[in-house]
Structures are given as structure tokens and as C-alpha cells.
Amino acid sequence: MAPTRGFPLRTFVSALAVILALLLTGFAVPAAWTERNIVREDGFVQLTDRLGKDPAFQARLAGIAVSNIEAGLELPAPAEELGASLLNDAAQHMSSWPEYPQAWNETVRRSHRLNFAGPAASSAGGSTQPGDPASGESAAETSLVLDLGPLVQLLGDKLRAATGVQLTVPDTAVVSLGGPSQRQAVDRVAAYAPMWWPAGIGAAMALALAVLTARRRSAVLVCAGIGLAVLAGVWQASAVLFGGLASAGLGESAMGSLFARELIASSIAGFAPWVAATALGGGAVFLAGVVGLVLRRRRSIRPAAR
């Protein structure tokens, strides 16, 4: 009779362990994706590749880069017409230049370092653009920024090659994407996302405890599989809801809203395979549990039939 009294306690512990495993998984998987694709520089560059091909966003960036050059441009009379023609072409077709992808990637890398690695030394030559810009160290400390310096440098190189005039262009061109509230959200993401691995280890240990203490281990697998499928559904629904918020404008400027909308769209698309993998994993665990229950039932029927 003693083992029988132990079964309810074992079942209770096993159920709690399954719930804990699912809760930890619910944090660990999105946090792991965020740490890999948002917090890490290389992942962020790959994620923002879609923005590098967005015509509206790139046209706005080109316009700001041209404004930075025009603000301090002094060309001799023979080169003025050629310089004006090149600037006009840059404002409309800069993203089609062969050198543009590399300049865009460097722009993303610089911006990621400013936003995630703390404020770097921003030069006083940051950009000014009505409505959108921020410049200098204070903007990097308190808001989300995009450093268009590589695009301005590319434009300066083109002007030098076309006119033969030695031009001095700013090394940085910092444009504001969002205010202090957005910066605080990014800081929290950078702080908590790397904690996915202890949560993942905890989830694995909790599931192992659930299986070891369960009276019917196959039933634990069935419940865990259903739980994983439910998690995948919750993540998908949350992604759709969060994507809807982006349409209302998460940034505090037109540039910030456009950047947020496109970045969230890329994030939803990038996270979708992880959601699908979790759902498939849950389905596999569920089927394994069902098979175990069927085999257990067959084993219990055979002695009774004899």
C-alpha cells in the first residue's frame, strides 16, 4: 500500500515540473532568438537586410545623407553643376549603387554598437535633419539612433572621384529613431535576452524531473507535447499582435516608425521557423507519448486475457 500512497505525490510533483518546464521554455526560446538576431551584431545585420532593400526607407536615408553633404559643400564654379547632378542622382538612386550594400551593412553595425554596446564617442559632426535628427553624444545616450556616416562617406567618395575636389565630410551622421522609452526597452532586451540559456537548462531539468517522478511517463510526454504546441500558438498570436502595434508607429519620428515597422516585420518572419520547429517538436513528443500509452495498454490487456 505504501507505493500507492506515493503515487498522488509523484503525480503532483510531475505536473508541477511539466508546468515549470513549459514556463521556462516560453521564455527561453524567444529570448534565445532575440539574443541571436537582435543583441548580436552579426544577427542584427542579417535581420536588417530587408531594410536595405526597402525603397521608401532607403530614399529617406539617401535624402538625409545628401543633406549632410550639401550643408557644408563648397565646390568651385566649374564643378558645381556636376556636383549638383551627382547629388540629385544620389537622392533618387543611391541604393542602386554597387557600393551601397557594404555601406548599408556598416551603417547597421555602427548603429548597433551605439544602441546595444552603450554610447560610443559620437563626433560633433552629427547630422541635422528637420523633424528626424539627433546629433552628438547625448542622442546616443538617451535615444535610439542610426549612424549614417558610412553613407555620407560613400557620397563624399563619389563626389571626389567625379569632381576631383578634396572634400571633408563628417565621419558620423546620427539620426534619431526613438526617444528614451524606446532606448530603455532596448536596454532591457540586451540585459535579459542572454539569460535564455539558464532558462533552457532549467526547462530540460524540469522535464527530466517530470518524467522520472511520473507514474505514467507516457502521459507526461502527451501533456508536454500539447503544452509545446500551445506555446507555439501563443508565440504566433503574440507576434501578430506586436506586428499590429508597429503599424501605429513605435518610433517617435517618421524615420523611427518606418524603421520599427520594417524591423518588426523582419523579426516576425525570422521567428516563424522557430515557432514551427517548436510546434513540430511538440507534435513529436505528443506522438511519442501516445505510442507509449498504447503499448502500455496492450501490455496490461494481455495478462488479463490469459
Image (tube, rainbow, N blue to C red):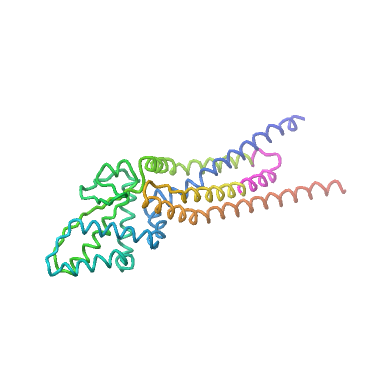
The answer to which of 20 and 45 lies nearer the viewer is 45
Residue with the most extreme right position: 306
Can you give x and y, in whole percent of width and height, for residue 210 in the image?
63, 40
The quadrant of the image that shows the N terminus is top right
Q: Is residue 52 left or right of residue 280?
A: left
Please give the range of residues in magenta: 211-228
Tell me which secondary structure the magenta stretch mostly adopts: helix
Number of numbered discs: 0
Q: Is residue 223 magenta?
A: yes
Q: Is residue 271 magenta?
A: no
Q: Quadrant of residue 11?
A: top right
Can you give x and y, in whole percent of width and height, for residue 176 in the image?
32, 48
| Relative vertical location of residue 185 with respect to residue 82 in this rendering, above or below | above
Residue at 30% x, 68% y: name it: 97
The answer to which of 195 and 189 lies nearer the viewer is 189
Can you give x and y, in whole percent of width and height, for residue 305 in the image?
87, 49
Residue at 17% x, 59% y: name it: 73
Q: Is residue 70 left or right of residue 236?
A: left
